[in-house]
Image (cartoon, rainbow, N blue to C red):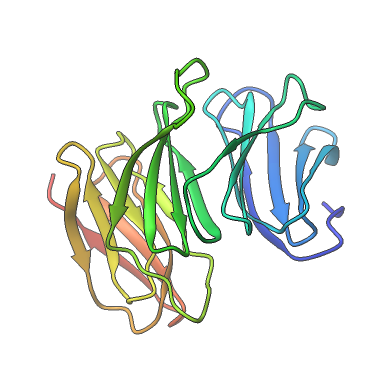
Amino acid sequence: LNAHPAIVNSMQPSRRGVPYLVSGGDDGTTKLWDLRVRRCVHTFEHQYQILAVSFDDPSERIFSGSLDNTVLIYDMRMRDKDPEVLEGHTDSITGLDVSKDGNFLATNAMDNTVRIWDVRPFAGGNNRCLRVLRGATHNFEKNLLRVRWSQKDAMLAAGSADQNVNIWDMRQLQLAYRLPGHTGSVNEICFHPKEPIIASMSSDRLVFMGELAD
C-alpha cells in the first residue's frame, strides 16, 4: 500500500464489516484503504501531522489525533463534510483507542494527560471530555505513546516515558497498576483478548508480559 509521501505514524483495520484500513502520517492526511482492492479510496486532509488514527466500532467514523492538539472525527458516510473537532488537550495527541463497546474514546497526549471522551453519535453537549487521567508522562524524546482499552473496557493502559506501564481501573476511575521493569520509554501496550495479561513494548527494544489480578 503506497500513497503517503511522508512517514506513516499510525494505522488500524476496521473491527467488522467492510475490510477497511485507516492510516495517518506526517503529510497531514488520513487515508482510507479498501483492502479488497488494496488501494486508497479516500483522503482526508489536515494542515498538521496526523499522529494516531482509529475507527469507531461500526467503522462509520474515523478519529485522527493531530500535532495541533485536536482529535478530528471524519464521517465516512459524508466524506466531504468538515470534521467534528474534539478540543481539550494542550499538546500533541500521540495515541487513541475506542472502547470495545464503542461508546468512549481514550487519548494520550504530550500534555501528560489521558482523556476519556463520549463519542456516542448523539451524545449531547459541546464538551465531550468526561475524564482527565494523570500518571502517564511524556519527555523530550517525544515518542508516540499509545493508549489501549482492555477487552471488556474494565481497564485502560497507557504508554509512558517514565519507563512504567500505567493501568487504570475504569470502574473505580483510579490508577490500579504502575508496572516497572523497562529501561526505556514504554511506547505501546496490548491486553490479551481473554486472559488477564498485558504486553508492553519499549524503546529498550524489549517486550514484557505481565499478569494482572482478575
In the displayed structure, would residue 124 be above or below residue 4? Answer: above
Q: Residue furthest top?
A: 122
| 88 shown above or below 18 | below
**Camera-side residue: 189 or 44?**
44
Left or right position of 1 against 162 = right
Which residue appears at 73% of the width and 57% of the height?
A: 48
In the image, residue 100 above or below residue 29: above
Extreme residue in the front direction: 126
- Measured from the top left, where is residue 125 in percent x and y? 45, 22
Quadrant, the C terminus: top left
User: Which residue corresponds to the image point at 76% horizontal and 21% vertical from the top-left?
Assistant: 78
Q: Nearer the viewer, residue 54 or 199?
A: 54
How far across and down, in percent of the image, does residue 185 sit? Answer: 41, 76
Looking at the image, is 139 positioned above or below residue 174? Answer: below
Q: Residue at x 49, y 81 (%)?
A: 140
- In the rendered structure, the answer to whether residue 179 lies left or right of residue 137 reads left
**Residue 16 on image: x %, y %:** 57, 26
Instruction: State the residue at coordinates (25%, 45%).
Output: 195
Q: Quadrant of residue 77?
A: top right
Q: How many numbered circles does the render carry? A: 0
Res 155 quadrant in image: top left
Residue 93 left/right relative to 176: right
**Of residues 82 and 156, the one drawn nearer to the viewer in this rendering:** 82
- Name which quarter of the figure residue 123 lies in: top left
Instruction: Where is residue 169? Give x, y as percent.
Output: 20, 45
